[in-house]
Image (tube, rainbow, N blue to C red):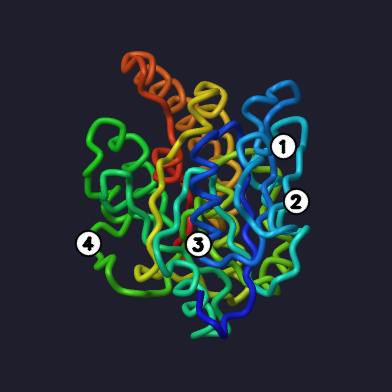
Amino acid sequence: MTADRAPISAVVVDYCSGTLLRECAESLLREGAANLVVVDNAPAGAAELSSEAVLRDLDAPPGWLDVVGTARNVGYGAGANLGVSRTTSEQVLVCNPDVVLQDGALDRLASCLDADPARAIAGPRMLTPAGELYPSARRFPNLVDAAGHGFVGLVLPRNRWTRRYTMGEWDHAVRADVDWVSGACFLVRRSAWETLAGFDEDYFMYAEDVDLCWRARRLGWKVAYEPAATVTHVQGCSTQRHPWRMLVSHHRSLFRFAVRSSRGWERALLPVVAVGLVVRTAAASARRACAGSAAPTRVSAEMSHPASETR
């Protein structure tokens, strides 16, 4: 931690993540987070998988850890909102429990926000456990790109619509202001968070991140990608527990965002979007069933937003 850096709180929304949560918390300790709020979405009765049980003997300063139980799964956005409400720092890191911050990541994200007062959100470079780049910075896709990515992407992941949406041609080693960044890990300015009232809790899972960034940009805030800050993201550790429910929730969230972001002639196509999402839900379900153990993850969800933003 840089000596003159202002304190930064961290918020993690957990759902039976086990040792992954512990690794995340340990990385936040190393990075000098001022405190950690863990919102435990595990249902009552899952004591052995509770956040408190996993973190009971964490070697942290007194008062550093605050575990808040919800007794039911209130969703990622609602959990994050609860966690942030229990912090006071001017900048807050929000992340999944299956994220591990690498050396200097928190300092570099803070420097990115500090470099431009108009920046509301900064997201890091994300790597898979195998060290491969996950394209966590994205464009708001138009309807054509969204349809091509959503359907063709089921069988040809490297199609041109997906590449355009995930900025496949872009140099991911360069800091830049982008349309949106993954909600799996980001640093947010409190003034922007409070202006936006945090995540829209009507999104149970998925699309709450693109929605947050979309609303921020409409109010004149910027969203940044900071590749000097690196995190490792396992991806999908919680969604695999309820894959079918997550598939439905995923597509429901996509339609909600399409309704919110559509303007003008695009709104006339919303019934078509709705039918397309029903078809895609069925196709994705069949694909998963055929794949056997393959499970929907946050990666597939975040890469499939049928957002419509052409302005």
Badge 1 marks a residue whose secondary structure is loop
Q: Mark 4: which amino acid?
A: Glu
The residue closer to the viewer here, 65 or 289, is: 65
Amino acid carrying mark 1 in the image: Val
Cβ atoms under marks 1 and 2 closer than 8 Å: yes
Disc nearer the start of the sequence (3/2): 3
User: Which of marks 1 and 3 precedes in the sequence?
Assistant: 3
Decide which of tag 1 and tag 2 comes sooner along the chain: 1
Pick the residue in front: 194 or 55: 55
C-beta proximity under 8 Å, tags 3 and 1: no
Residue drawn at (36%, 18%), measured in percent from left and top? 293
Quadrant in which residue 39 is drawn: top right
Q: Label 4's element?
A: loop
With respect to residue 123, does 203 lie above or below? above
Q: Earlier in the sequence, mark 2 or mark 4?
A: 2
In front of the other: label 4 or label 3?
3
Q: Is residue 282 left or right of residue 16?
A: left
The CA distance from mark 3 to mark 2 is 24 Å
Tell me which label, 4 or 1, sits earlier in the chain: 1
**Disc 2 designates what residue?**
82
What is the three-letter code of the residue carrying label 3?
Answer: Arg
Residue at which label 1 appears:
74
Where residue 205 appears, as percent x and y from the top left, is: 59, 39
Check disc 3 and report the residue beneath it.
Answer: 30
Q: Comparing marks 3 and 2, which lies closer to the viewer?
A: 3
Q: Position of residue 304 (x, y in %)?
A: 42, 42
Q: Pointer 4: what residue? A: 169
Q: Is residue 101 visible?
A: yes
